[in-house]
Image: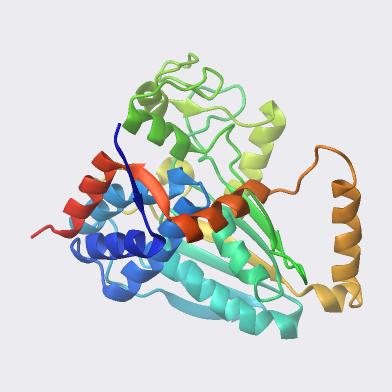
Amino acid sequence: MTEKRITLAESHKICVDALKAHNTGLGNAEVVADALVAAEADGLRGHGLSRLPSYCAQAASGKTNGQVQPVSKQVAGGALKIDARSGFAYPALALAVDELVVMTPESGISIAAVANSHHCGAAGYHVEALARKGLIGLMFTNTPKAIAPWGGGQGVFGTNPIAFSVPRVNDEPLVIDLSLSKVARGKIMIAEQEGQPIPEDWALDGEGHPTTDPKAAMAGTMLPMGGAKGAALVLMVEILSAALTSAHFGFEASSFFSSEGDPPGVGQLLIAIAPNPISGNTFNNRLEILLSAILEQKNTRLPGDRRLRLRQSARQNGIIISEEQYDQLVRLGSRA
């Protein structure tokens, strides 16, 4: 397979051109491109450029409305309700971050509930934006059905990622981002695109049997991390991100990958906390004491270290994708 190195700026332009060619407004295309390129730079390929073809197909079919702007309403002193209006999730979440940054220093804690939403990419991307403004960020999101209730055989919940980020005074924010399935479903999508097998403990096929075939896995269900305890966490996230936001549950939502059907209509819940009032201005010092205690031990690292190294490398050297993928993405932008 022939590889091609491209700069982050070129990657961004490719994304914007492709989205604009598929019924997406320039402002929305820019926000979506920012997130996709950031994920690719961080090595999160399942949330990066691999998503562009399905995003374009859904915007072209009208399953995702690439032209709308999200609408925000303050429903309580520290609470926002944001309607993504069946558009991309990224503009709605960017609006949530902007408004939470303004609200939280006064309230101490604030919350934004996003409904009628779509795939939000790497959840850590959104909470990191809060941490860069000095806030603790916590995010829950549901996704179309991919995980069965513990003991069941039919998907009810999505992979339901959670993300958490805290600011650091003299370092990059600490970001924790994880899917509650054993692996993110995007990894299986990448394996399917590349014709590669997957480990047999990642997913079950449509008949409930372990499978190494990514296509069968995409048609089946994912296994939760941590067995029954993980399945309980999946339920918790489903309640917070869908019941609380009045969004579609995973079993009600259409696919993030197909251009057919109604909009997914999933939800996201974003919480922002101002650390200094609650901690009496001791948070930064106490955090560094904890992180130092971790790093004093041999063979330890903080979550996200690899991601930050890849990000720095991508900024300096660009990213590497296959010639085939590059040609496919460029063609999307030249669509008549």
Residue located 56% across and 63% down the image: 126
Residue 77 in sight in this render = no
Q: State the image quarter where residue 111 is shown.
A: bottom right
Quarter holding the N terminus is top left
| Residue 4 horizontal side relative to residue 281, left or right | left
Give percent across and percent down for residue 306: 63, 46
Q: Nearer the viewer, residue 285 or 124?
A: 285
Q: State the image quarter where residue 168 is shown.
A: bottom right
Vertical comparison of 78 with 21: above or below: below
Residue 136 in sight in this render = yes
Vertical comparison of 250 with 123: above or below: above
| Residue 90 horizontal side relative to residue 281, left or right | left
Residue farthest left in this picture: 336
Give percent across and percent down for residue 89: 43, 62
Quarter holding the C terminus is bottom left
Vertical comparison of 84 with 162: above or below: below
Colour scheme:
rainbow
